[in-house]
Image (tube, rainbow, N blue to C red):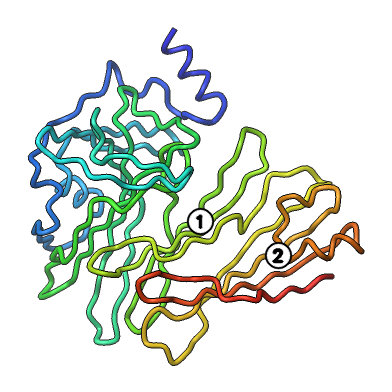
């Protein structure tokens, strides 16, 4: 019965490999040093991001990939680790990491960049989800916990400079979307996460979250909710967003502009941005562009600075 259930999920596109591994997956107990921010690691020669991830989390590795479906994970637990609370942005709920029943860690993406002095960096981002005997990720309203490992290149050796195993949960089906590297100041890089979630069949609502180094750790410094509304019927209001960081004389945490473009329908205006709603009284349907500026406030993160610019077509 269990195999039939997971094969059904596979047919729905939720799980692409229901029987890639014979028997239940295993996990390995790791020392509590696995989460220490003071960990050291040196990588000589070619930087193999998956190999590096295995060194950071030396648990049980499985490759459940099949065809275009990719599922490479490291299963581990830490019986002596002291769990810490984090926030899952799906519903703003608190959860503990590492997970009590064990953790499955997957590679998200590795970013390569340089600073103005020419120093080279690699930022390894990875996703944690709760351990599953089948290697599945199936909870729609549960995000994946994102973590960071930053390396610098010195004398042909990549050295771990900063390690933060967890920074909160984002996304759906226990999977955090791969963030976009964003230059927000002089040699200051941050990571923008765009999520999209909603009930089965839609609409789906998209949010933006910016993770940046502040106060000694990588943390969320910007949250912009419902900047997208997709997967809707033809006669429903819908919009998408882009964002950019204009060049300015600010050395750090430059302003961020979020531009929202879409269509509105007076018969479906409940979720339309507040700035657009007044126009639905005289025009039943139309296109709109909404530009919102976010300014960094020390101790508070990025705050919306109104009024927003609105253009109606």
| Residue under label 2 | 261
Q: Residue furthest front?
A: 299
Q: CA distance from mark 2 to mark 1?
A: 16 Å
The percent coordinates of residue 67 (x first, y second) are 44, 35
Instruction: Give the answer, above or below, for where 3 lies relative to 235.
Output: above
Q: Residue 194: which disc?
A: 1
The percent coordinates of residue 161 (x first, y second) are 16, 66
Q: Secondary structure at mark 2?
A: strand
Of residues 70 and 180, the one drawn nearer to the viewer in this rendering: 180
User: Relative to residue 296, is residue 85 drawn left or right?
Assistant: left
Q: Secondary structure at mark 1?
A: strand
Query: Can you tell which quarter of the image residue 251 is in?
Result: bottom left
Residue plotted at (32% across, 73% down): 113
The percent coordinates of residue 153 (x first, y second) are 17, 72
User: Relative to residue 190, is residue 119 drawn left or right?
Assistant: left
Residue plotted at (32% across, 81% down): 187
Of residues 54 and 224, the one drawn nearer to the viewer in this rendering: 224
**Dividing the image into 4 quarters, which one contains the N terminus?**
top left
Residue plotted at (31% across, 38% down): 72
């Amino acid at each position: 019965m269990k195999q039939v259930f997971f094969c059904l999920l596979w047919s729905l596109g939720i799980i692409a490999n229901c029987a890639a591994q014979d028997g239940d997956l295993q996990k390995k107990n790791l020392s509590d040093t696995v989460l220490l921010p003071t960990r050291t690691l040196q990588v000589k020669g070619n930087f193999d991001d998956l190999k590096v991830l295995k060194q950071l989390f030396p648990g049980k590795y499985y490759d459940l990939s099949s065809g275009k479906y990719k599922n490479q994970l490291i299963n581990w637990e830490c019986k002596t680790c002291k769990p810490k609370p984090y926030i899952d942005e799906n519903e703003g709920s608190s959860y503990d990491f590492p997970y009590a029943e064990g953790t499955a860690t997957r590679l998200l993406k590795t970013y390569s960049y340089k600073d103005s002095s020419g120093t080279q960096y690699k930022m390894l981002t990875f996703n944690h989800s709760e351990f599953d005997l089948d290697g599945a990720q199936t909870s729609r309203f549960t995000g994946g916990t994102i973590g960071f490992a930053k390396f610098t290149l010195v004398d042909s050796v990549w050295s771990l400079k900063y390690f933060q195993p967890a920074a909160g949960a984002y996304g759906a089906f226990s999977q955090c979307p791969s963030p976009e590297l964003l230059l927000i100041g002089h040699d200051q890089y941050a990571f923008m996460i765009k999520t999209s979630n909603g009930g089965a069949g839609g609409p789906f609502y998209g949010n933006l979250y910016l993770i940046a180094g502040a106060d000694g750790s990588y943390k969320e410094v910007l949250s912009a909710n419902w900047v997208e509304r997709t997967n809707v019927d033809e006669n429903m209001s819908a919009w998408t967003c882009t964002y950019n960081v204009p060049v300015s004389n600010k050395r750090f945490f430059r302003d961020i502009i979020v531009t929202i473009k879409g269509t509105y329908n007076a018969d479906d205006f409940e979720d339309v941005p507040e700035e657009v709603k007044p126009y639905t009284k005289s025009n039943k349907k139309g296109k709109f562009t909404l530009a919102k500026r976010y300014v960094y406030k020390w101790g508070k993160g990025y705050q919306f600075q109104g009024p927003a610019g609105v253009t109606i077509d």
